[in-house]
Image: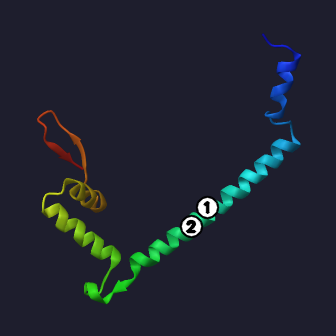
Amino acid sequence: MANEKNLQRGTATQFRSGEEAAKNGKKGGIASGEKRRENKRLRDIMKSMLERVEPEWGGLTLLEQAALMQCKAAAQGDLKAFECVTKIAGEYLTDVNDKNEFAWD
């Protein structure tokens, strides 16, 4: 049963109104902004790596080389690679009909 002593123990873990809640919200917003900037920097690095031309790959970019390897894997029967290639091409399978045949977009 709750008594005054039990009720006082929980006050240290609760947000206090107004000022403390605003202070904690500000800390969360700052941390969120830092994480967004870090993620953007990583995205920019990855984009530049994908666009870099490699002479040993016949002048293809990493993105083109990866697409070529996915197509080769799909042609050899890799269903995950096939799914990836068709999704990127916009020709992915949307549903299976009653006869267990795939319906194309």
Residue at 24%, 50% (x, y): give it: 105
Amino acid type at mark 1: Arg
Left or right of 33 on screen, residue 85: left
Picture disc at residue 8: none
Q: Outermost residue toward the top?
A: 1
Q: Residue at x 29, y 71 (%)?
A: 66
Which element type, helix, strand or loop, lies under badge 2? helix
Q: Is residue 14 left or right of residue 61?
A: right
Q: Amino acid at mark 2?
A: Lys
Q: Position of residue 43 (x, y in %)?
A: 50, 68
Give the vertical position of 37 relative to 29 (above or below).
Answer: below
Categorize mark 1 by other alpha carbons within 10 Å: few (<14), some (14-19), many (20+): few
Query: Toward which corner of the image does residue 40 lie, by quadrant?
Result: bottom right
Q: Is residue 98 left or right of 61 when viewed as pictured?
A: left
Image-based side of 38 in relation to 74, left or right: right
With respect to residue 73, does 65 lie above or below?
Answer: below
Q: Residues within 10 Å of mark 2 (few under 14, many from 20)?
A: few
Query: How far across and how far down the image is residue 10, in percent?
Result: 80, 27
Give 7 or 62, whichever is nearer the viewer.
7
Q: The N terminus appears in which quarter of the rendering?
A: top right
Q: Which mark is residue 36?
A: 1
Based on the displayed image, in which of its 4 quarters is residue 41 positioned? Answer: bottom right
Q: Which circle marks residue 40 in the picture?
A: 2
Per the image, label 1 sits on a secondary structure element best described as helix
Q: Percent from the top left, x then y, of residue 68?
A: 23, 72
* 26 shown above or below 70: above
Q: Residue at x 69, y 57 (%)?
A: 31
